[in-house]
Amino acid sequence: MKHSFTLSLLLLATAAFAQTEKGNSFVSGNISTGYSSNIYPKNSPNKSGTFSLSSGISYGKFIKDDILWRIGVSETFSRYRLESNNAKFTNPYGSLSISSSGLYFFGKERWRGFVGGGLGISGSFYNIKQSIDGKQLTSKERNFSIQPLFEAGALYFFNKHLAIQLSTTSNTFPLNSYGLSTGLLYWIKPTSFEAETKDLSILNKGRWTLGVGFDVDTRRLRNNLANQSSNPTQSDENETNVSLQIGKFVKNRTMIGVRMGYSKNYSEVTSTPQIITKRSMYRGGVFMKKYLFATRLTPYWEVELNYIRNNQEQKDASNFSTTHFNTFELRPNLGLAYLISNHFLVETQLADLLVSYGTQANSEYKNWSANLSGGLRPNLRLSYVF
């Protein structure tokens, strides 16, 4: 029987932004760390674990009205270790990046757009060490790059201090986007538009909520290493997720409800041999949520209990296998809700503790895991209230 225990921690500092006027400035930072360890039976010689740490800080200042200069530094370090009988394997990796850019802001009231560019300098290393029967094998690699940076995006203000940002960055112009990011920003000085005073009854007893979610994700990874004797490989993965939430306010600002979800994942590794994996996941659960204030912007706390059924099929040139996993989750979390009107609200999760227990069909495999995370992240949920 194999037992696994995983613990990871993510802390992300809030970004603090001021108005787009000369002299105003902001500072933002992030730090994240993770640790995982597999615990094997007493008679097993295997030991393995992973540690990671990443952090970053950036500073920006408006040198003129609507013109921002920004500088940032970030680092990443990770280390994987495996021991088995007379063999040991470690794979440390690290990177350091420095960037400087200028951004031009435009717009007024609740909407602000921005465009700009700059320069990024980065270096990375990895150092693989392997020991088999006392024989030491090492492999080292160092990389250094200087690249232009181009960025464009927009802000939308929920109120005088809180805004959501969507941006994309690229190393080429015109923009050939390689990533989209979104999150919440806190502005130190209030913006110029007037605060709204409309009374809202969206959180009152007796009302119902309906929320839906849909997500499609496609990824491709190509591995073609000149110093390796193996054939080049390419990994393609497609994932689709749909979800539904129904809730009722049993008291003012207190809601209970159910959540259901389905996701489908297909991955294909083009190599020798070719490997195809299909996964389908069904999720169901109940929750209780408490909104702390009857204001347009309010924090909330929530507790979820979930059951997840995960079916998996895998095949290559000579094998075909099927299995399924059962997972039970306890998930308390904290977040912020913004009441758009008497019929719509949007929420984002700020902190989350996930404790789960999983089993595999026709196997002694069991898995306990605990994950703690926090920060301003792109996990917005829109609900309709009736």
Image: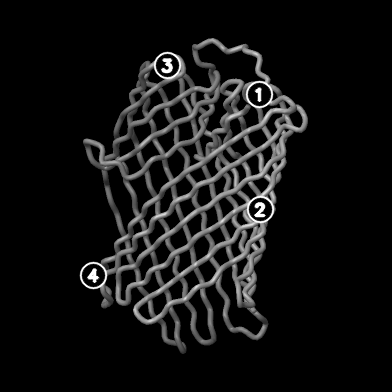
**Closer-to-camera residue (377/306):** 306
Left or right of 129 in this view: 3: right
Query: Identity of the amino acid at label 2?
Result: Asn
* Mark identifier at residue 350: none
- Residue 362, above or below 108: below
Q: Which residue is mark 2?
A: 306
Left or right of 359 in this view: 137: left
Report the Cα–Cα distance between label 4 and label 1: 60 Å
Do tag 1 and tag 3 residues touch (Cβ < 8 Å)?
Answer: no
Q: Residue at x 37, y 61 (%)?
A: 125
Q: Which is in the foreground here, disc 1 or disc 3?
A: 1
* Mark identifier at residue 21: 3
Report the Cα–Cα distance between label 2 and label 4: 46 Å
Looking at marks 3 and 2 on the same chain, the residue that comes earlier in the sequence is marked by 3
Q: Which residue is mark 1?
A: 202
Query: Identity of the amino acid at label 4?
Result: Ala
